[in-house]
Amino acid sequence: MDFEIPEEERERARELQEWAEKHLAAPSSGVRDRKYHQGIWRALGERGLAGLCAPDTWGGAGRSAQGTCIDLEALGHGAPDTGLVFSFAAHLFTAVVPLWKAGDDAQRERFLAPLCSGAAIGANATSEPENGSNISALQTTAELRNDRYVVNGTKWFSTNGPVADVFIVYATVDPERGFGGVTAFIVERDTPGLEIGPLLDKIGLAGSTLSEVHFHDCEVPVHQRLGAEGGGTMLFAESMRWERGCLFALYLGTMQRQLNAALEFARTRRPGGTPVGKHQSVANRLVDMRLRLETSRLLIQRASWLLDRGRRCDLEISLAKLYVSESAVESSLDAIQIFGGRGCLTDFGVEGALRDAIPGRIFSGTSEIQRVIAARCMGL
Amino acid sequence: MSQTVESIRGTITAYLVENLLDGDGRGLEPETDLIDGGLLDSFAIVQFVSFLEENYEVEIPRNEITADRFRSIQRVAGFVDTTLQNRAAADPAAA
């Protein structure tokens, strides 16, 4: 067993962190501008990040799941706007991964390569108003008519929806077949019948865009079906495995940045002449923050290690997602408490991490769902 | 390691009995409908595929996994057998 991260990996992480500090800051006026996001994606592509975990055959960087986590932690640490890193990770795990795993060569050449170069932004459309992300109960339908599927339905909570070029859409070819009817499709933004709803404002992750996506008799050629009819359930599970196992590594970065700032404050802030960190009540919070960070990192590394080896890892991934997302909230609350009044000021940069952390307990399956998955993996 | 369809079927049956039937395999036959019978739901099938991949050291292409291929023990065993044979043909050293 070796817990040492190789020096070349640590050097790469340092460089990525510095790169993110310069390139992943969203002006408050910029997040609604699609051109702004296209510029960010071009930069990600030039840095070799836009297809981070995809094979180099298609323009990806060929990073393992473990390597992807190291990179995302570095980006999360450096990026002034966590929402941009979140958006990029959603592009990776909900669009790049499904195309890499299930696309045929023609689909990979046409759709995956531009996603990996940063020329195109990816999104997915899964969640629905009635059934959330319950893949067995999708109400969006895809009816085969000659050489096309006609897609009808409404999706919501589509991360990158307002700015995406390519959507991975999950719909059922037969609602009676439950999860056996779920099928994935590649749908381009300008396809007639695809309507992107207005940008949805949310708590935190400001640099990430979110919208509904509507399909009104949207015709998708058969050759843009991703995988087999009925193969969508496994593909979605694979996509979620990567998202839950790797995306949350970005929160390791935000937690590390937050801990560094809180430590600095605790050492240098001296009301009455004594550093506040010398007070046991403050020191205990800092120790708890450190413990959550170290534990989160180990859980993420273990889960991604298993994922890389094709081993069963759904339990470990659910535990990691659950623990990291809850820890990010807890440590953000601790940081605010340590900083006191300053921690409550929006201009001071402490409370924003809490707003960025709260959605983490919801997306990619809520904390409650992660416990359900873990319980089933434990034979309950 | 060479596998027969019969041994694959036995391995699959043992997995299902242990993990989804609390050890009671009465009524589970090679042709029992695992999907309509409610044994495999969207969660269980994902776990099942992970088990097969780990146990047989093979990555099953995601575009080949459909509910119909997992409808019965017999079908799964045939599918796994074909996958292993394809792998052996592509890489005799792995057989």
Image: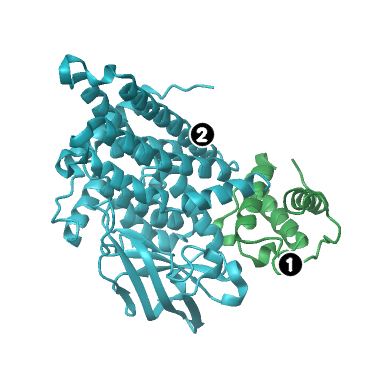
Chain colours: A cyan, B green
* Residue A293 percent coordinates (x, y): 39, 31
* Residue A56 percent coordinates (x, y): 38, 45
A121 sits left or right of A247 in the view: left
Q: Quadrant of residue A352?
A: top left
Element assignment for label 1: loop
User: Does A180 appear above or below A346?
Assistant: below
User: Does B15 appear above or below A327?
Assistant: below
Q: Amino acid at mark 2?
A: Arg
Q: Residue at x 69, y 43 (%)?
A: B55
Near mark 1 (Cα within 10 A), the count class, few <14, some 14-19 or many ≥20, is few
Q: Amino acid at mark 1?
A: Gly
Residue at the disc numbered 1: B37
Q: Quadrant of the N terminus of chain A?
A: top right
Element assignment for label 2: helix
Q: Is residue B24 visible?
A: yes
Q: Residue at x 46, y 43 (%)?
A: A321
**Label number found at residue A302:** 2
Q: Nearer the viewer, residue A50 or A200?
A: A200
Q: Is residue B58 visible?
A: no
User: Does A152 appear above or below A345?
Assistant: below
Q: Residue at x 47, y 30 (%)?
A: A298
